[in-house]
Image (tube, coloured by chain):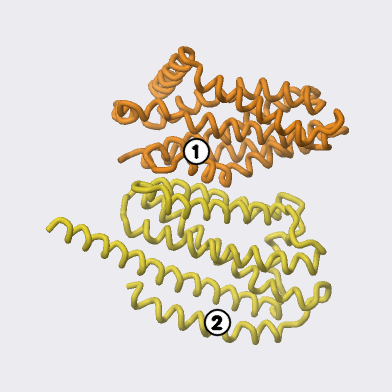
Chain colours: A orange, B yellow
Amino acid sequence: MKRFLQVAWLVVRKDLRVESRNKEMLLTTLFFAVSCVLVFSFGFVRGGEAIEGSASGVLWITIAFSGTLALGRAFERERHHDALRGLLMAPVDRPAIYVGKLVGVLLLLALVEALVVVMVAFLFQAPLFRHGWWLLTLLSLGTIGFASVGTLFSAMLLRTRSRAVLLPVLLYPVTIPVLIMGVSGTFALVQPEPDLVLARVWVSLLFFFDIVFVTLALWTFEPVMTE
Amino acid sequence: MSRRLFPWLIGLSLVFFVVAPILIVRAPLEQEMGLIQKIFYFHFSAWMAMYLGICVLGISSALFLFRRKPAVDRLAVSAAEAAILFGLMGLITGPIWAVKSWGVWWNWDARTTIALILELILVAYLLLRSYGGPGSDRLAAGLGMFAMANLPFLYISTNIWRTIHPPTSVVPTLPVDFGIPLWWSFAGFIVLCLALLTARVRLEEQRATLDRLYLALEDE
């Protein structure tokens, strides 16, 4: 187990180091997320008033869109110079490589979400911070569910043709339940009379889905990536 | 094997489908919904055939991923197509029933939503197989397992969410008059699903043989 975590941490550190040098994924994803929220606010905010319930939807759709953009690039660096083969040939547990990559994506998305939440709260006048801890739990669980499937799909599509098109095509149908739970849970928190019981139901369902998704992804990563 | 099984299965399903309308017409009218309730016999059975298709898809995908046998991959793609077909029947018969009994064509009921999501995953599966290029069979197998992971949620959805679909306890406790046409149609759809599976697997086998022959010809 210790070795597993060490390998995962090495992969995370490698990704963070590369990212800290060129900041390509971070800046492009952040910029895309900002543009997304702005486009939605042009559509859903009229005369300073947001359409009722739109904030929770905009928040999660923006996360899904910018998450897809980030996931599409997650394994891009490994494509060059046969780096993926090198990574896969390393005498380590393959699921550890997956976990390392997943943590890297999660860290990136956490930064994006921090900005998106503030922007949505500001532009849509949504009381997102009223139950901050609940929102944090929903966002964390939702992002884990979304990114766990996304990282697996991004890795497996690496060697295919038209992967840029296929990633969203495969990712959205599988992760729609996570997005529905995220949107419904957030809506329960920001509605005029917050419904914490309902929010708790969505949180527990998200937790259950995450367990299923992460287990399946860990289980399938090795056979899917073996040539 | 599929060559010998197919005529038997298709013949048997023909018997089921010729008799089914007679049994359905003879079944008593449901008091609240009246004539429209009769759609239930095919609606439920089509979904059950879809369940079967997805189970076959999930199990054969797992076997293909971990054992690497091309035969189970051929079964997986056939099952995905059959599941899409029966799922589509469920998605078409559902709204016809809904508009009469609930007054709307479509509502985002938990079971309807999960069923639609499953149908989307299956379409994505076929898109991946069609446009993914070489090696997409393994990736599709991964996706097939995710499709199967949704199945328990679809089944229990009516028990954990307040939906307008009846809970799972309704079908096993149906009165005999309703039960006979229902289980008869159910058997018909399952046999038809198996018949389509055998025919489709055979087509895949012939395609694989043809590919092998082409490659052998090129090598000469």
Name the chain under label 2.
B
Q: Which residue type carries mark 2? A: Phe
Q: Residues within 10 Å of mark 2 (few under 14, many from 20)?
A: some
Q: Please state the horizontal and vertical placement of residue B14, each as a whole percent of the image.
A: 51, 83
Q: How many marks?
A: 2
Q: Quadrant of the N terminus of chain A?
A: top left
Q: Please state the horizontal and vertical placement of residue B88, each as a whole percent of the image.
A: 59, 64
Q: Residues within 10 Å of mark 1 (few under 14, many from 20)?
A: few
Q: Secondary structure at mark 2?
A: helix
Relative to B40, say whether A2 is above or below: above
Q: Which residue is mark 2?
A: B16
Residue drawn at x 44%, y 40% as measured from the top left: A163
Q: Which residue is mark 1?
A: A215
Q: Quadrant of residue A176?
A: top right
Which residue is nearer to you in this view: B152 or A183? A183
Which residue is nearer to you in this view: B17 or A36? A36
